[in-house]
Amino acid sequence: MRCLLLQTKENKFFTHIKNKKQLEQYCKVFKAKMFIVKAQIKKNQILEISKMTSLICNKNENKEKIKFEIIKQIN
């Protein structure tokens, strides 16, 4: 499944590609990286923005291993 990967120093978060615009400023401020990826992920594992905000603040959360292939780096 194609989705958006937000990579911080501590974690990787998978979300919908439609969330790209909302996450661009976050990436600039916090030096996170964003990629379009093809991931071996179930639809229910892709995070909505509201869920991501709480997970980003918790460095020990979201340690699930998901295989993915980078299609394109956005920033």
Image: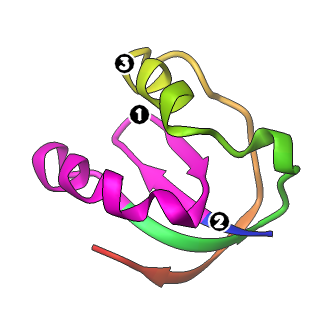
**Kind of residue indicated by mark 3:** Cys
Lower sequence index among marks 3 and 1: 1
* Secondary structure state at the residue bearing disc 1: loop
Q: Position of residue 37 (x, y in %)?
A: 62, 72
Q: Position of residue 69 (x, y in %)?
A: 68, 75
Is-magenta flag for residue 41? no
Q: Which residue is mark 1?
A: 10
| Disc ID at residue 57 | 3
Q: Position of residue 15 (x, y in %)?
A: 59, 51
Q: Residue furthest bottom?
A: 71
Task: Determine the residue positioned at 55% across, 44% down.
Answer: 13
Q: Which residue is mark 2?
A: 3
**Kind of residue indicated by mark 1:** Glu
Task: Determine the residue positioned at 36% across, 18% down.
Answer: 57
Question: Where, by quadrant of the figure, is residue 74 drawn?
Answer: bottom left
Magenta-colored span: 4-33
Give the mark count. 3
Lower sequence index among marks 2 and 3: 2
- Indicate whether 73 appears above or below 4: below
